[in-house]
Structures are given as structure tokens and as C-alpha cells.
Amino acid sequence: MTAPYRRRVGAVRPSHLMFTSGVGALIDLPNFSVLVRGLDDWNYGGVPDWEPIAEPRLLAAVRALAGRGVTQLRPPPWVEGVDRDPAGPPARVGVPVMPFPAWLRCTACNELAPIDSQAFGFDNDKPRRPHDARFFHENCPRKKKGRKPLAVAARFLLACTAGHLDDFPYVPFVHRGGPCPKATFPRLRMDDRGGNLGANVEIQCLNCGARRNIREVFGRRSADKLPQCRGRHPHLGTFEPGGCTSDTTRVLVLGASNQWFAQTLSALAVPRTGASQLQTLVEQHWGALEGMPNAESLPYARGAVPALRGFQRWSDAEIWAAIQHHRTAPEHHDGDGYPDLRTPEWEIFSAGQLPDPTPDFALRRDPAGVPSQLKAFFADVIQAERLREVRALIGFTRLDAPDPDDPDLVTRVALSRSTPTWVPASEVHGEGIFLRVPEELLTAWQARVEPSAVLRAHREAYARFRQDRYSDRIDGPFDPMRLWPGARYIALHTLSHLLIRAISLECGYNCASLSERIYAGSTDDPHAGILISTAVPDAEGTLGGLVTMAEPEHLVRLTRRALVDARRCSSDPLCAERIPRDPDTSLHGAACHVCLFVSETTCERGNRFLDRRLVVPIGDDPSLALFPDLP
């Protein structure tokens, strides 16, 4: 926590800072909530010998979106030893947060006041129990013997689609836009009256007696009752110069899922196709090599920089030539959508000869090839015994989630006040299975389904989705079908979900511990692969059970189970008959929580673009199925 509450108040995993609790996000603690501050306030001074995360492909993609000034991917600040000495120096190292919202309510007398009003005190005197930190009402009239009554966060906030976040204006609200006639700093009370018709919370001024129910600012007709957004970024401690021009100010309840959406990029640490081993090492350790002024500095750097210990096989001249080559290599990005991080991975997985294993990446292909029972289903099966995935946070949005294809359609909020030179990142070491579907099978299937009414309904739903969500944000001509993923993606994505659900029942990983990467390519360069890998940075990522599922006897059983389960759903016939129709804008057909949906951290597209009928025969037209038969 930042001053004047500078003490440890909890802990999160590094992966949480990428997806749920990153910069600008609200974190619900047991007794109050905090907001993660911007990168300007992160301090690595107490972290000895920390090193940036090396992943040159991801860094190049981050630079393309977040600015050329970004030179590092940094892990969160952390020092070992908090468990041994919870009151020592390690406890003062971490990600800074601040109490937010800045208004508290007493749980005994319902008094509502700002934190800085001196009505509340703060208690966090148990280093081994940071989760017991609490605010309390100092002079509560209903105080009983013992501890002073708990004060909790007032649960209403203001946000807009430009990414601003602010405290709810309780004083102007209860006085209908004006000041209190009897006090400069009026005392307020918040009474939660319950009910089943939405918010029923009354704000009362104890000085003048004014009352107003907060339900008035909920609903479609509430916009004229809310003040103009002030353009506040509390994580940066700034206000937008000139104010905010957004007309989409909304009231949020503390804990709402749409208060923060991460915008992240991720890449697997794979060697570049055709690159030499030395060039690959230079790319992986570019953070340590970028500042080398000349070849004469390399002898000293070999002994002083730990990252260079793996370069003993090469001379200084060879290393310097590789550094110069990397410096002059162009960073390709055409500016249309996100940088392409999948094609280099697809080239490695689909190559006839697999690359030599490294500490971060090791693939194995069964010499016997694909099991005979599955030759009609898969063209290749690869066991990824070692994988390293690096994830970087480049920004976040509020109210609207970032578009997974177009990074500019939703306003991205900056992570720092100044131009960033680094972004937070985390890395996951795990395992995975890569499955390639036969191209000729997919090509023939596409020819059958492209003219079908089902796929036409999917395309029309995508156009409605784009029209409803994005049409008023795009300058110039609006193309509702831009970045349409296509039938191929829907089939591969559905197959991936079916396999993930079957794997979670077979190998010991829960569904949320797995993630997917779909390699569908584009119309001009089609791909046909699925990578299912571990997604959590802990011991569960090294169980070995996932790779085992690619062994022939297990894979046959797993595939059969996934396809058999796909043919029926306990929500049928409603699920099996579902096709997105006007005015529906949801982007799935025969799919639901029972048969196909998985956790948000597992699915790369938010459980969109799914339809069982395009993989297995269900309904009246079995010709739509990619796999009409079972293995």
C-alpha cells in the first residue's frame, strides 16, 4: 500500500497481474478494496539481481503497439523471504496499491465519508496476517465494547469507455447538483434497503436532511442525471487534459466484471525458422546484448553478464556479427490488427524436422506417426515436453473488452504517466499437445459448409455484433465483416474446446489450468493446428499428464470421448437447435456451458465462435460435420 498505509496487504500470482489484477484494476481484499498503481510507482530498488524476461518476438510486438520506447519485459518486483520475515525488507517490496474507492461506509452506523475526512482509522499491525488489514470508524455512535466497527468501501463508482474511473459524487448527487445549504463538508449516511428490483440504496445528508435513492442513476434513462466524466485516471493520479469528451459515463458497482479488461500479448519461446543457434540465443538475450557498444566490450561482458554464459562456443567476432545482424533486422508489422505472433510458431510445429531441444522448448514426434485409428482425423501429433510462454500487459480498457483482432477499436488506457520504457510480463513453463488437422479434409469440408444456411447465420451474427459494438467508433467506411475468422476457425476452436474438456477429465489438470492456441491462418495462408498447453505458473504446470495424453492409446480414447460427448448435451434439443438469428448478436451456435464453454483464462476468444454441428453430426444436416464418423 502507498503512504500513509504503507504496508503489505495481500499477495497475487504474477499471472494475475496479466489477466485479473493488473495496473488500474481493483482488487477486492477481505475488508476493503485497492487499486493497482501505474508503472511510474513500481520500485525495483529493493530487488537484487533482477533480470528482464527475454522474448524478442514478444518484445517486438509490444513495441509495435505500446511504442518504440519499450525496451524491456519486466517480471513483477518480488524478493524471497516474506514468509520467514514478514516484517522485514522483503515485505516492503511488491506492486504498489492504493485504497479505492476513496469513500467508506461504517458497517454499524452507516456513516458515509471520504477516507481523508479523519473519520476513519487504519489497522494493519499483524505482519503475518496482511488479510486482516481493516479500516474502522473512529467515533461511531453505535460503537460497542471491543474493536471499533469495520468501515468498508462505498460500493459505487463512475467509469466511461475512455477508460476513466472516479468516485461516485455522493455530495452533489444527494443535493441534486448543488452544495449543501447548511455545511461546507456535510455528513452523509448510506442506507441499503435491499429488495429485488436492483439497487435500493438511499443517500441522506445529516446536515440538511436531503435524501435521494441511488437507483435513479441506474438504467438507460440515467445519463442526464450523471455528471460529465472528469477524465480521472486514479492509477496514475492524473486527470485528462481538457477533460473527457466521452458521453458514456456509467455507474458501476464495486466488483463489477467490466471495470477492467486486460490487453495482453503472448508468445511461445520458439526458435526462428532457419535461424542459427547463435542467432536464436542473441534474440533470446537481446535485453542484455542491446547496449553492447562494440566487440571489444564482449570479453568483459562474458564474465560479468550471467546471460552470456551460454555463448562459450562462439568467438567474440561471431557474437558481434550476430548482434549487428539482429540490430539491422526489420520489425515487421503492417499496422492492421495485432502483430502476427502465431505464424512463426506454426512454422515450427508444422515443420517436417523438429528443432533441437532447448531448456525452454522441446518437441517430440512419435516415430510411428499418427495412430491408424486417427489418420482420418489428424495429420500430425506432437508432444511439447517443454514450453515457455511469455505474456505481456500493454494496457487495459473499461466497460468494453479489447477486441481480440483489432487493438484500436476500444480505447486503451496507458500504464504510466510518462512514455513507458518497459511493461510488466510473466512467463509460464509447462507442456502441451499439438494436433494438426489434414488440410485436404478441411478444404473439402469448407466447400460443403460455406454456402450453408448455418454458416450464413454465423456471418450475419458477426456483422450484427460488429455493427452494434463498433460502427460508431470507426472513422471512415465501416466493414462489418472485417477480420471475420471464417468457418475453419470455428471448427478448430470447437474441436479444441471438446478436447480440453475431455483432457481435464483424464489427465489431472482442471480445465482452468489449460489454455489453447488456434492456428487457423488466413484465407491466403491457411493453417490447421491446435495447441493445448498448461496455463498456470506453478507446480501443476509440470505434472507430465498432458504430454502423456498424446500417447497413441490415450489419444485414441481421448478423441473418441470428446467426439462422442459432443453429439449430446443435457441442454438438447435447445442447444443442438440453436443458431444465432436476428436480433441475436452472440457468436455461437450449438454450444453452451454444459457442452462447450470453458473458463475465461482457457479460451482465447471468450467462448465465441463455437458450434458443435460443424464438428460432429447433430441436427438435420450431418453433412455440416467435419468428423461424421468416430475413431
Image (cartoon, grey):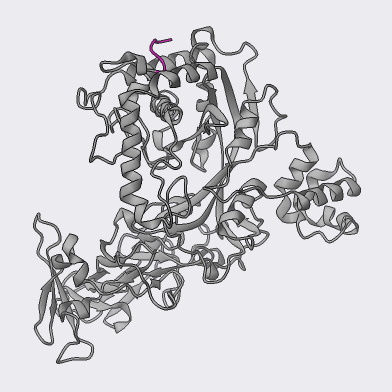
Query: Where residue 513 sits: x, y (%)?
Result: 44, 37
Q: Quadrant of the C terminus?
A: top left
> Is residue 434 left or right of 57 when viewed as pictured?
left
Q: Residue at x 32, y 74 (%)?
A: 102
> Is residue 608 left or right of 349 when viewed as pictured?
left
Depth check, front residue: 85 or 601: 601
Q: Tell me: residue 173, above or below residue 372.
A: below
Depth check, front residue: 92 or 530: 530
Query: Where residue 321 sits: x, y (%)?
Result: 86, 48
Depth check, front residue: 616 or 500: 616
Q: Residue at x 65, y 34 (%)?
A: 361
Q: Residue at x 33, y 64 (%)?
A: 160
Q: Residue at x 80, y 47 (%)?
A: 309
Q: Is residue 587 visible?
A: no
Looking at the rendered structure, the number of numbered marks drawn on it comes to 0
Query: Where residue 202 sits: x, y (%)?
Result: 12, 70
Q: Tell me: residue 532, above or below residue 218.
A: above
Q: Is residue 2 visible?
A: yes
> In the current view of this chain or complex, which residue is farthest to the front?
477
Magenta region includes residue 132: no
Q: Which residues are magenta?
A: 626-631
